[in-house]
Amino acid sequence: MGIFADIFTWWNGATLSTKLYTKRRGRLVGQDERGNKYYEQKKGVGPHGHPRRWVIYNGEAEASKVPGAWHGWLHHTVEAPPTAENYQARGWQKPHQENMTGTPMAYRPAGSTLNSGKKAKPAADYQPWRAE
């Protein structure tokens, strides 16, 4: 199913056409700790006046897999990629975590029906609405 998946699926990595475009027009800029690879257009500029930048995900294509440092580079917030500037996270920054929605690791606030089934108690000043 390898070539079939490469041609028709995008959620398990890059399609065949994306791989061919990347090989022909892309220049590898770097790779993050999760194995995602980042590319920049070799020649010319894109429609917004600067070279196009893109990511080839390692595994499932999920935008929340891109760490903050690479996100800034992809969106032209910073010019130098994290590999070139020896990026160091600030002390207040948490380690990158991808979106956990829909998984057992998802955030479930107090009162959520998925959080142990216990309903949160209403605030002391809460008065329920009643029809007169």
Image (tube, grey):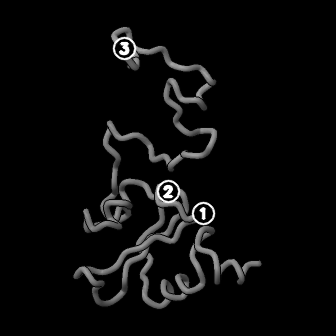
Query: Is 127 above or below relative to 61?
Result: above
From the image, tell me which residue sits under label 3: 126
Q: Is residue 51 left or right of residue 32?
A: left
Residue furthest out toward the front? 132
**Could you tell whether 104 is left or right of 95 in the image?**
right
| Residues tagged 2 and 1 counted as in contact (Cβ below 8 A) | yes
Q: Is residue 100 left or right of residue 124?
A: right
Categorize mark 3 by other alpha carbons within 10 Å: few (<14), some (14-19), many (20+). Answer: few
Q: Mark 1 or mark 3, which is nearer to you?
A: 3
The amino acid type, in three-letter code, at marker 3 is: Tyr
Q: Quick check: 56 above or below 114? A: below
Q: Which of the marked residues, 2 or 3, is nearer the chain's N terminus? A: 2
Which mark lies nearer to you, 2 or 3?
3
**Distance between the alpha carbons at the discs numbered 2 and 3:** 41 Å
Which corner quadrant of the image does residue 35 belong to?
A: bottom right
Neighbour class for label 1 at 10 Å: few (<14), some, many (≥20)?
few
Measured Cα–Cα span from mark 1 to mark 3:
45 Å
Distance, label 2 to label 1, CA atoms, is 9 Å
- Which residue shows up at 37% across the image and 17% down it? 132
Question: Which of the numbered marks, if any, corresponds to residue 65?
Answer: 2
Q: Is residue 84 left or right of residue 99?
A: left
Q: Which residue is mark 1?
A: 60
Mark nearer the N terminus (1 vs 3): 1
Give how far across and how far down residue 15 sits, in percent: 59, 79
